[in-house]
Amino acid sequence: MKPSLETTVNGMKFENPFVLASGPPGTNARVIAKSFDLGWGGCVIKTISLDSSKVVNTAPRYGKLKSRETGEVVGFENIELISDRPFDVWIDELKQLKKQYPNKIVIASIMEEYRREAWHEITRRTQETGVDGFELNLSCPHGLPERKMGMAMGEDPELCAEVVAWVKEVSTIPVWAKMTPNVGDVTAPAKASVRGGADGISAINTILSVIGIDLQTLRPMPTVEGHTVPGGYSGQAVRPIALRQIMEIARALPGVPVSGMGGIETGSDAAQFFLLGAHTVQICTGAMLRGYEIVDELKEDLTKFMVEHRFERVADIVGKSLPYFTTHFDLVERQRAAKAAKAGRSNRDAETWQGAIKQETDSLTSG
Ligand SMILES: Cc1cc2nc3c(=O)[nH]c(=O)nc-3n(C[C@H](O)[C@H](O)[C@H](O)COP(=O)(O)O)c2cc1C
């Protein structure tokens, strides 16, 4: 039987677990509609706020790290802010989108200043459009923290709990909190968010980075009028860090749905996130670099993996590799026990051989 990619998380029915992550791939309703036509299961829209006039982007705002051997982009840095499109325009577009695509999952990524009324207002007005869920951007690492938003909230567990609780006072739909990886212990803000009422956790947002220095001009990149700021790193290169943080969150919060992202470009990459406890996966940089069309490959590749391992549903994969993480002390113990068992086996083998030889010689001499 062909495995099913359909999966239900927090009551939201995804026709497949591949969701566009908040960013350029979900920058307006027109491109989101295109992605739905091509087969994506859902989209987290580019983060919106009540007053877009405060959001001013720069150009250039992207930087790339390429493989020395193949020239392939393996790492990607951005200093892009949240959506600079007016809130009212977004509200109209979201209404249309849900009318046109009732079976696709639309998650509104929202961000506001540290004010209860502002979070209440954005939650109330956005959910009136019929979107399926919220993702709270508590994690944008650049620009917004200067206004005490994004990562400035996400790195402080108490603020996470408080802001999530404000949203939950008003929200009638599921709420995911999106974590920053730029903290020592990602489980602290994740646990605090769940304490505040979050229905799920998304991770990871981008990793603070400096993509490189132009050795001609000696200016750091991306260079805007000769200067820059550290930006957010994403793409293939961040996948091992994302996998580690997903594993930590899943172990710390058993039963809480996790939406995993960071460097996913293939179905095999996605399978590893499910194995470490993710229930859905999100993709931003992969879709930017390779196009929305990769969704076909993602679905095929994941289906092949499921057939090989006889997984019938995505939920069957979730967390299957988690039991194999332990402590270093335990690894040493396991190694010692395995060596002892092997030595015991060789002793037993030697005894068996000696016994057999003795029996044979006995039978020869007695004959
Ligand atoms: C250009 C760009 C813009 C982004 N904008 C947002 C955003 O507005 N809100 C947000 O929550 N995450 C944003 N992200 C982060 C992504 O949603 C995602 O968490 C991160 O890039 C890791 O996934 P990836 O390796 O698949 O890109 C952005 C990422 C990129 C590359």
Image (cartoon, grey):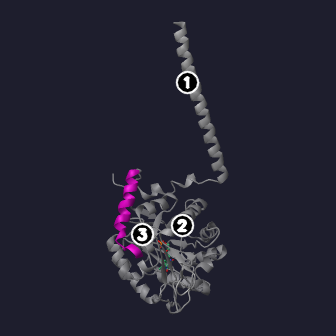
Classify 191 as above or below 339. Answer: below
Q: Please report contact status of discs 3 and 2: CB closer than 8 Å, yes or no.
A: no
* Magenta segment boundaries in residue numbering: 288-308
Is label 2's Cβ within 8 Å of ligand 1? Answer: yes
Q: What amino acid is labelled 3 in the image? A: Thr
Query: Distance of mark 3 from mark 2, alpha carbons?
Result: 24 Å
Residue under label 1: 353
Is 30 part of what is drawn in magenta? no
Query: Distance of mark 1 from mark 3, alpha carbons?
Result: 55 Å
* Circle on res. 70: 3
Q: What amino acid is labelled 2 in the image? A: Ala
Residue placed most toward the observer, 236 or 139: 236
Secondary structure mostly seen in magenta is: helix
Q: Secondary structure at mark 3?
A: loop
Image position, residue 332 (x, y; %): 65, 48
Q: Residues within 10 Å of mark 1 (few under 14, many from 20)?
A: few
Query: Distance of mark 2 from mark 1, alpha carbons?
Result: 52 Å
* Circle on res. 242: 2
Q: Horizontally, is 359 left or right of 295 in the view?
A: right
